[in-house]
Image (tube, grey):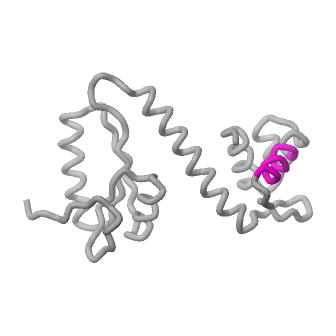
Amino acid sequence: MDTRVLNYFLTVAKTGNVTKAANKLHITQPTLSRQISDLEKQLNITLFDRTNRHLRLTKAGTFFKKRAELILELVSQTEKDIHTQESELSGIIRIGCVESSASTWLMKIIKKMNHHFPNVQFDIYTANGDDLKEKLDQNSLDLALLLEPIEAKKYNYLPPSNS
């Protein structure tokens, strides 16, 4: 599966129309239709319900859309990480945090980290605990700050400290 085809699929899903998506992608409509058809054959699943000049994602299509976005995000992140590799510490740390007093604490820690490691960037994602655990499971986050009570057995975790 090619990232180009994933981009094609996501554009069709967003526009709901192959002709509009083809124009946006600067390719011909028959080429795009064939790519989507080939993708469905490769996956052995119907990704779109086809109605009068409009496409709607099927249940499988909705699932595949989420995964395609995740795959492309990971590819993009990997490309960025490869290009920013230097002899000193660099890269992007993806952190999830529930909105609470932990957010303020996290910002203080990030400020200190930026002072010591200016080539490290932080992507902060704020959500509820269930969303953060899902992002951890999908490897979309490197770490998350969660509030107890929480089921944490499958994660490496540190309990909060008073320091």
Above or below for 78 versus 159 = above
Q: For residue 158, what is the image quadrant?
A: bottom left
Residue 103 falls inside the magenta stretch: no
Measured as percent of width and height from the top left, residue 78 is found at 48, 36
Name which residue lies at 83% across and 65% down.
49
Describe residue 81's horizontal placement relative to residue 122 as left or right: right
User: How many dots with numbers?
Assistant: 0
Measured as percent of width and height from the top left, residue 47 is found at 77, 59
Q: Residue reaching furthest bottom?
A: 149
Q: Which residues are magenta?
A: 33-42
Measured as percent of width and height from the top left, residue 32 is found at 83, 43
Name which residue lies at 89% across and 65% down.
51
Measured as percent of width and height from the top left, residue 39 is found at 78, 49
Name which residue lies at 32% across and 66% down.
99
Name which residue lies at 80% across and 61% down.
46
Q: Residue reaching furthest top?
A: 87
Above or below for 120 versus 58 = above
Residue 37 falls inside the magenta stretch: yes
Quarter of the image with the N terminus in it: top right
Describe residue 64's horizontal placement relative to residue 53 as left or right: left
Quarter of the image with the C terminus in it: bottom left
